[in-house]
Amino acid sequence: MRQTRKQMYEKAIELWGADNQVNQAIEELQELGIALNKFRRNSSYAECRDSYNSYRGNVLEEIADVRQMIGQLILIFDFKDPELQEMSDIVLRKLQREMDHEREKRRG
């Protein structure tokens, strides 16, 4: 029988412990930052659609690692879907306000 992502994340947390997985999440976030910096130094955003670009591939891999760690963090901190959705909505509204403010600044 195939395991769900949640089951895999639960087993990883059980095996390595919450502290180690939080540390791993921090490491994966740092690796994503490094991959993004390497992309910016060695590629252009026009190349983002080039699936053969190794820097793009590295960014993709690190994003996948971070997504897995976020799934584990959600379990470790016992965040529920409504709570996550509410915070996501708050952050999205904040982004909208910041973009509106930026547009106003650029107009003059």
Image: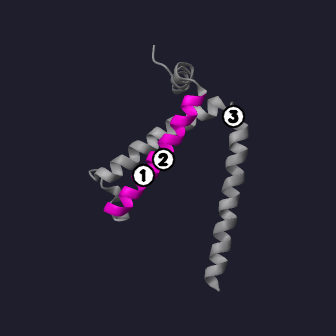
The label nearer to you, 1 versus 3, is 1
Nearer to the camera, 76 or 51: 76
Is 82 in the magenta? no
Q: Is residue 42 visible?
A: yes
Q: Give, as a three-letter code, the residue at label 2.
A: Gln
User: How far is disc 2 from disc 1 in space, using C-alphas?
Assistant: 6 Å
What range of the chain is rendered magenta?
A: 19-42
Name the secondary structure under disc 1.
helix
The extreme bottom residue here reads 108
Q: The residue under label 3 is which amino acid type?
A: Phe
Whichever of callouts 2 and 3 sits on the residue coming sooner in the sequence is 2
Q: Is residue 43 something that shows in the picture? A: no
The circle drawn on residue 34 is 1
The alpha-carbon separation of the residues under discs 2 and 3 comes to 23 Å
Task: Report which residue position mark 2 lands on.
Answer: 30
Q: Is there CB contact under 8 Å for labels 2 and 1?
A: yes
Q: Percent from the top left, x then y, of residue 81?
A: 68, 36
Quadrant position of the N terminus in the picture: top left
On the rendered structure, is 76 left or right of 21? right
- Residue at the image position 67 percent from the left and 48 percent from the top: 88
Image location of residue 68, percent across then percent down: 50, 35
The label number, if any, that marks residue 79 in the structure image = 3
